[in-house]
Image (tube, rainbow, N blue to C red):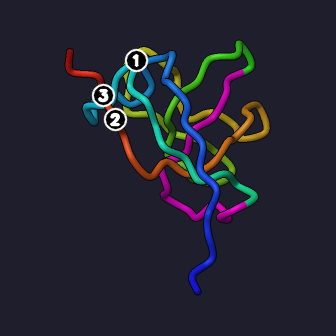
Amino acid sequence: MPRKVRTITKTLTIESYEAEGIFIGDKILIIPVKEKPLVNGARVIAITPDGEVGMFGYHPPYLTTQSRSIDAPIKIVLMDIIGTAIKVQRDLS
């Protein structure tokens, strides 16, 4: 029997990946770090020191963005990584 994987959802609050078509207000389905180890190049969801939620590229020892509004790369030690992004959902209404 396959193992069930716990997931969580967060809503993006900063423009960190808009060049990839992922925007503030998008809901991201995440596999937490405890459930799935991070891999180089993955898209991860992290909380900034200001408490904002964003999507980033995982490239140890840095996180990268696809944004003109955030200076990157950002040292991983400055961020709280929640987990790996697996799905983006947008309210189209």
Q: Are marks 2 and 3 in contact (CB under 8 Å)?
A: yes
Question: Does residue 91 sit above or below 1 in this rendering?
Answer: above
The residue positioned 36% from the left and 39% from the top of the image is 88
In the rendered structure, which disc, 1 or 3, sits on the residue that comes first in sequence? 1
Q: Secondary structure at mark 2?
A: strand
Amino acid type shown at disc 3: Arg
Question: Does residue 40 sit above or below 9 in this rendering?
Answer: below
Q: State the extent of the magenta-drawn residues as a range.
A: 35-48
Image quadrant where one finds the N terminus? bottom right
The image quarter in which residue 17 lies: top left
Outermost residue to the bottom: 1
For label 2, the residue is 89
Q: Is residue 63 magenta?
A: no
The prevailing secondary structure element of the residues shown in magenta is loop
Residue 56 in the image: state x and y as whole percent. 51, 39
For label 3, the residue is 90
Outermost residue to the front: 1
In the rendered structure, which disc, 2 or 1, sits on the residue that comes first in sequence? 1
Mark 2 burial class by Cα count in 10 Å: few <14, some 14-19, many 20+: few
For label 1, the residue is 24
